[in-house]
Every structure is written in C-alpha cells, then in structure tokens.
Amino acid sequence: MMIFNKAIPRRTFLRGLGAAVALPWLDSMVPAFAAQSDVAAQTPLRLGYVYVPNGIIREDWLPATAGSQFETTNVLQQWSPYRDQMLVLSGMDGGPQFVGGHVRGSSMWLTGAEPKQSMNDVHSGVSVDQVVAREFGKDTQLESLELCIENAAELAGQSAGGYSAAYTNTISWRTPTLPLPMEHRPRAVFERLFGDGDSTDPAARLARIQKQRSILDFVSQDVNRVMAGLGQSDKGKLNEFLESIRGVEARVQKAEAQASKELPQVERPIGIPEYEEHVKLMFDLLHLAYQTDLTRVSTFMLAREYSELVYTQIGHTEPHHPLTHHRGIPVRMKQAGEVNQYHARLFAYFLEKMASTKEAGGSLLDHSMIVYGAGMGDADIHNQWNLPIALFGGASGKLKGGRHIQSPKGTPLSNLHVAVLEVAGIQTEKFGLSNGKIDLYASA
C-alpha cells in the first residue's frame, strides 16, 4: 500500500488583505506513520506567568502537608479539577529583607534583582520570561506577550518611597534598564495577533473597522482553499477555532462600544463593572496566541501592586489594597481572602480552556508551564517570605503534578527560575538570587 498524503506545515496561515490567521494544531500536520511519542516531543512548550497583587492570605492558600496528600485550602479548591497538573510550591522568598514592600514584590518576582530607588533612573534585572522568550521567540511571530488589566498611563504616579511606577506597572524586564510595558487594551492585543499581518497600508485596517467586518471575512477565500484539503475531523476543529476567533473579536468590539459610552459623574473605581469580562477576554486572547503558536511566552498581571480595584462582583465596597492591611481583624482577612479566591476562579477559567484544547495526543495544558502567584508573602507587613506560588501543566511530560513541594525556609524564589529554565531547555547555574534549583521532578 502506498500513502501519498503529505502533512501540511505547522506554521500555516490563512491570509487576506492585511490579516494573517495562524492555524491551530491539526491532525493533518502529523506526517504519515509518525509515532505519537515523536509528535508529542515536537510539540512546542508554552510558558506563562500570572501575577496577583498585594499578597495572598496564607491561611487561605498554604497547605500544612507536603507531598501528594496535601490539603485543599480555600484558594487551591478553585483549581481542584486540575490537581493532577498542579504543583504547589512553598518556602521560597522573593528577597532577603523582612519588609520588602509592593515595589520589591513585583519588580523582583521574575528578576530576583533589587530595584534601584529612583523615580527616573530605573534598574532591576532581566526577567526569567524574557530569557526564555529570546530562545523560544526564534520560532514564533511574537517573542512574548505582556498583558495587564489596569491602565498604566492612568496610574503613572502611583508608586511610593522614591521608586518609579515602572516597578509596579510590569513584571517583565527585557534588560535591567528596560521594563516592558503591559498591554491592557484587548483590541491592541487582538490586532497584534491577527491584524495587519501582511500589510503596511493602514487603509486595510481602517476599511475593516469602518465596515465592521471581521478579520475572518478577509481570509474567507483562503479558508475555503485550506478546508478542501482537510479530513472531516480537521474541518470540525478548524471551524470551531474560527468561530472562537469570531467570538473573541465580537467581544472586543462590544467592550470598545461599552467603553465609549458616557457615564454619570459619580465616584466609581477604575474599570470595575467590566473587570471580570476584561480578564476573561485577555485570557481568551492568550489562549488563542498559544493555540496558534504565535507566541510561547507570556506574562499577565490580574492587577498591579497598590491596586485600588473594588471587587463589586463579590459584594465588596472597599478597595483591595487597604483590605490586605488587615491587622489581623477577622472580617478584613475574610474579605481579602475572598479576593484571592475570586482571582483563582478567574484563572481556573483559563486552565479549563487550556485543558480542553486538544493538541498532539494531549492538551495545551499538557504542553505548558504556567506559574501563578504573588510577589509578597504577608501583605499586611509587606514581607517577601514564603511566597504563594503554584505551577500548572505537564511541560510535555516533564513535570508530575498533584504535589506540594515544601522547600527549606529561606530558599530563594530564583531557584524556581533556574528549574524552569532547565525544563525549557536553557541551562544556567545562576539566576538572580539563586543558590541552587527547586527539584520539580522529586517524587511524592
């Protein structure tokens, strides 16, 4: 028997008038007779960091038991369906000082470098995501995505202690003196992924916006061409993927329409009514970026340090930041913990999308490493000790989840960065404050 079918290239795009839509993984991309293990080994690894501000209430986060029999706390309970792909990490410090503060929390989280106290002359360190992005970005359209929810321009002066707001408006540093801006506008992210891919002529984008036409309208002929060569299973996958893009684009347009409405002159926390939809929309865009292999590295701040967001969605009337300075008052600790659980539920939305997206004999989550956590251990007293950190995904079979790894007291968080770099195929003996590496492969 002779087999003539050829695998379509993994980096196949649908193209049309200034738009380029990368295809997700399809069965047709697998060469005939390719072993499943070989296909899985060739599937790209995705790395992501999701940051929450103002610490996490330890009693709601930290299990008392190490190993595979750890307790499900209030925050961890939000991720129960993904327990087998979750590593809870404790005992790691972001910095050596007892009082670290918000600035050190966010700026040192991925760099392990002390921020320079200055309002203009910023200096920290290269962040671990950018070390990976330089390597992974050789094979993708975008080296990395940096996402956030709060508008940095509106918060430019909100820092303290003689430190620049740059230290709290990002967690990603390209160089020690170049903090990368985080993008909060869904439209900007969407067009960075799909819009104006082949055209330098702004007329193409303007025409689409004026006619309210979808990017998919411009690539429709190419869709038909590609569809003709696919099997029924792949046709179903591609149709589902294209509908996902159309749905996200429609939600971006809706969000823009809502943002343009004039609102009554009343006191209202920044962007609160739209917060949950905003977060989910950004997670959907990140999911599409991973699914289409447009990027393999991302950072996402669900809010910044000092955040004054009021989470009306869970019945709160007081901003988040003051709640975290609870001084041991039970009702305030409870409310701060509710914010932590709410953030965790929003992240669970992303985990579900990653886990349900099939790819090369597994899922997107199977082929990812997503770190979730905060830059402060106890926000009430601003320390960086025993940071709340969890790692999700299988890293293409390299990680075994379902465990709580408890490091010796005083272990630098930078030791985790060394371990992550190793899983990503980047060997280094030293990163930031590291004095070794976390053993992510240890058995329960």
Image: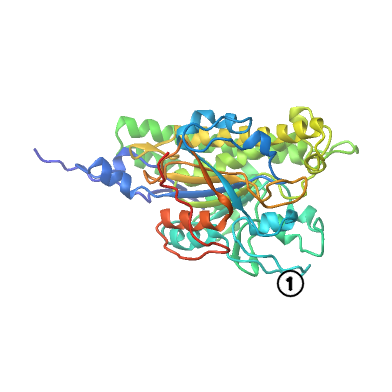
Which one is nearer the viewer's eye here, 259 or 202? 259
Q: Quadrant of residue 226?
A: top left
Residue under the image location 33 percent in, 37 percent down: 361
Mark 1 residue type: Asp
Q: How is the image coloured?
A: rainbow
Q: Which residue is mark 1?
A: 121
Residue under the image location 52 percent in, 33 percent down: 70
Residue 430: where, in percent of width, then height? 50, 66
Residue 208 against residue 77 in the figure, above or below? below
Asked whether the viewer can see residue 195, the reply is: no
Q: Quadrant of the N terminus?
A: top left
Residue under the image location 62 percent in, 53 percent down: 93
Residue 94: where, in percent of width, then height? 63, 55
Q: Is residue 428 left or right of residue 301?
A: left
Residue 79 against residue 33 in the figure, above or below? above
Q: Quadrant of the C terminus?
A: top left
Q: Is residue 286 left or right of residue 5?
A: right
Q: Quadrant of residue 201?
A: bottom right
Residue 188: where, in percent of width, then height? 63, 50
Query: Which residue is the extreme one toward the left?
Result: 1
Query: Which residue is the extreme one toward the bottom?
Result: 121
Residue 19 against residue 107 in the figure, above or below? above
Residue 312: where, in percent of width, then height? 78, 31
